[in-house]
Image (cartoon, rainbow, N blue to C red):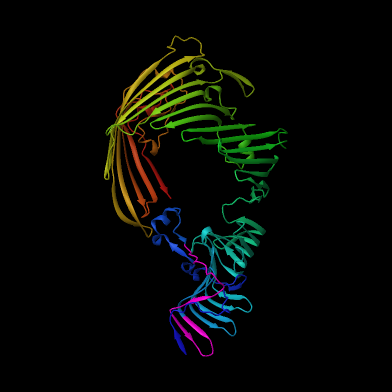
């Protein structure tokens, strides 16, 4: 008997155990017994910084599989820590056993090869690696005459797709096609079978980018929740013409309330469409179409269109049109286009359209062209709205902006000073008379006013930032000038103007410590913050319409804005201080797992500037409510 160390290029032609076309039979076993590390699973802590940067924050690791350089001939190379060759020709290999044929590898802790019978037994972390795929188990029996491998406690991994699964029987990959019997498939990480697909027969075609499954069960926590006799699905991000997953909703009476059957059309590399037959209970068949395009000149665009020719309830045609588009012209020019139109105000509630369409009582129609060249930014905007709720009175409907021209100047710094300037000119108008709910409404007084507005905002700040905190004093001067028209003479100034300074002092500190939460290590921060804001009272603002201005909803995020209004038609009188404290739990990779904050605004005087003339008890309060927020990622 002869001992061989580190066997190399062992020339047995019969050892073609990695030839394509091998069928692999596996016995079912518990998921927990599979060693996915042998199949390339690498935890986040073992990844390089570059690899971690490509990993989504919610992933705890990734599959890393290296395919060796292919051999240049049809030979077998074998390596092991220790080998024994008997006089009868049997070979025993132990310790880090590796067989290679072309670019295919078979690894095991132990192998016993019988050249005369062309059979072998392998044990201990057996794995078969081919380009793009890894198969593995604890034990394997090879019969080269029959071209089979029997694998116990087996699993498979497609590293590039983050796919894994198990199988009772499978054929080794041939032309990037893998066929399995009694198989499962999931994108979940090892040990986290939140969901999987179980099938009697499963085929994965990596070259075409899709899989097919027969007698399919969708399982949640390994509990079947849906059965499909046949299922075809993508395994990568390539587009494929065909039916997408249907959807069905059932009401409390067991009726199919909503049935959607989408069909996807891959028209061109830069053009696709989804046509959906959408049956809505008590209304009929609604046809929906989503068309998406990309072009060098116009950028990205999306058209959503839905039509129901004859509503079973109303007998009327009902429809929806939504078009959005945005793109860049060179390095400095960009544009944005948005159009919405709906046949009636009940369309969204009745039809539940599948498209992601902005749903509001006022559907925007907007076009914008922007030009950017640091430190200048300029834009021209035109915007109007379709009001879908007929119960909204004419006086509460939004103004059109036809047009709005904006120019901002934001140089980086002058020394340590940060200077910003914004200029904006807008023409506001809306209809003064309309038929609403079969009755005519006519605006009068201030509600009938339209006008032109000039906005000038100047800001000088002195930001001071250190690792332990920050302090930013800033001084603003805000100026407004109007030309009002389209109302009966009232004696009021038709060209009012006013301005006011605003002083803000914003500061905060950062404290941190190492801690543990739910068994994981974190950096916990404690961040107290104060903001003082002062701006004097400017009278006669109530005579100006609130063209685009609303009172700010007092939430935690509004604590440190230093204002009480959104929009530009009101300059709030301010003498207040905002206090707050935030804590964060941050992982080693910088991901914010948890954040919570609490704060309050304290007022040193009653507020006088309002949008409406009605008294508001809130304006006499000495403090806001205690406000808080929490977010877990």
Residue 268 % position (x, y): 63, 45
**Residue beneath the point at 46% across and 67% down:** 37
Please give left or right for residue 449 compared with residue 285 in the image. left
Magenta-tinted stretch? 64-93
Instruction: Answer with the quarter of the image where residue 113 lies.
Output: bottom right
Residue 60 % position (x, y): 44, 58
Please give left or right for residue 545 compared with residue 121 in the image. left
Front in this rendered view, residue 397 or 505:
505
Q: Could you tell me if residue 583 is visible in this image?
A: yes
**Furthest residue in direction front, as rendered:** 72
- Vertical arrangement, residue 61 with respect to residue 2, above or below: above
Q: Could you tell me if residue 358 is visible in this image?
A: no
Front in this rendered view, residue 625 or 382:
382
- Vertical arrangement, residue 369 with respect to residue 101, above or below: above
- Vertical arrangement, residue 196 with respect to residue 428, above or below: below
Residue 583 % position (x, y): 34, 47
- Vertical arrangement, residue 252 with respect to residue 500, above or below: below
Magenta stretch: helix, strand or loop mostly? loop
Residue 120 % position (x, y): 55, 81
Front in this rendered view, residue 216 or 377:
377
Query: Would residue 294 be counted in the magenta stretch?
Result: no
Please give left or right for residue 211 compared with residue 515 in the image. right
């Amino acid at each position: 008997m002869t001992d061989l160390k580190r066997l190399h290029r062992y020339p047995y032609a019969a050892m073609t155990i990695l030839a394509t076309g091998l069928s692999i039979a596996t016995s079912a076993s518990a998921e927990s017994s599979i060693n996915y590390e042998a199949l390339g699973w690498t935890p986040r802590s073992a990844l390089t910084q570059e690899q971690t940067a490509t990993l989504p924050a919610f992933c705890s690791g990734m599959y890393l599989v290296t395919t060796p350089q292919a051999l240049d001939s049809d030979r077998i190379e074998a390596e092991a820590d220790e080998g024994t060759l008997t006089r009868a020709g049997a070979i025993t290999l132990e310790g880090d056993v590796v067989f290679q044929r072309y670019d295919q590898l078979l690894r095991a802790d132990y192998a016993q090869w019988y050249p005369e019978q062309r059979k072998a037994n392998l044990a201990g972390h057996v794995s078969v690696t081919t380009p793009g795929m890894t198969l593995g188990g604890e034990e394997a029996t090879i019969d080269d005459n029959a071209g089979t491998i029997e694998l116990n406690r087996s699993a498979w991994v497609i590293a590039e797709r983050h796919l894994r699964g198990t199988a009772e029987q499978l054929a080794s990959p041939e032309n990037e096609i893998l066929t399995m019997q009694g198989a499962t498939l999931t994108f979940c990480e090892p040990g986290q079978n939140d969901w999987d697909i179980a099938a009697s027969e499963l085929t994965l075609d990596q070259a075409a980018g899709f899989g097919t499954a027969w007698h399919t069960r969708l399982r949640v926590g390994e509990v079947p929740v849906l059965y499909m006799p046949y299922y075809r699905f993508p395994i990568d991000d390539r587009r494929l013409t065909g039916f997408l997953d249907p959807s069905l909703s059932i009401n409390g009476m067991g009726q199919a309330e909503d049935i959607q059957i989408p069909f996807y059309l891959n028209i061109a590399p830069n053009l696709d469409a989804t046509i959906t037959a959408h049956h809505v209970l008590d209304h009929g068949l609604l046809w929906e179409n989503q068309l998406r395009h990309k072009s060098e000149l116009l950028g990205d665009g999306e058209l959503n269109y839905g039509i129901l020719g004859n509503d079973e309830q109303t007998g009327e045609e009902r429809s929806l049109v939504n078009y959005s588009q945005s793109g860049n012209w060179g390095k400095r020019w960009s544009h944005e286009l948005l159009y919405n139109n709906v046949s009636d105000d009940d369309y969204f509630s009745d039809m539940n359209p599948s498209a992601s369409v902005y749903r509001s009582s006022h559907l925007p129609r907007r076009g914008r062209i922007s030009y950017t060249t640091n430190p200048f930014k300029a834009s021209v905007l035109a915007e109007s709205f379709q009001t879908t709720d007929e119960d909204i009175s004419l006086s509460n409907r939004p103004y059109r902006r036809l047009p709005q021209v904006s120019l901002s100047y934001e140089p980086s710094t002058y020394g340590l000073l940060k200077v910003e300037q914004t200029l904006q000119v807008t023409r506001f108008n809306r209809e003064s008379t309309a038929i609403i709910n079969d009755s005519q409404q006519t605006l009068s007084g201030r509600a009938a006013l339209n006008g032109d507005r000039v906005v000038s905002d100047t800001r000088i700040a002195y930001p001071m930032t250190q690792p332990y905190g920050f302090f930013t004093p800033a001084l603003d001067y805000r100026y407004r000038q109007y030309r009002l028209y389209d109302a009966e003479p009232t004696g009021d100034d038709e060209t009012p103007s006013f301005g006011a300074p605003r002083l803000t002092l914003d500061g905060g500190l950062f404290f941190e410590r190492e801690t543990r939460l739910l068994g994981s290590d974190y950096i916990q921060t404690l961040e107290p913050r104060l903001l003082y804001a002062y701006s004097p009272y400017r009278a006669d603002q109530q005579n100006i319409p609130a063209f685009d201005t609303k009172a700010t909803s007092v939430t935690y995020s509004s604590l440190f804005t230093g204002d009480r209004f959104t929009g530009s038609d009101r300059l709030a009188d301010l003498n207040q201080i905002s206090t707050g404290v935030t804590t964060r739990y941050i992982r080693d990779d910088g991901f914010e797992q948890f954040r919570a904050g609490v704060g309050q605004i304290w007022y040193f005087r009653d507020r006088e500037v309002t949008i409406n003339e009605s008294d508001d008890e809130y304006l006499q309060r000495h403090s806001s409510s205690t406000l808080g927020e929490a977010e877990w990622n």
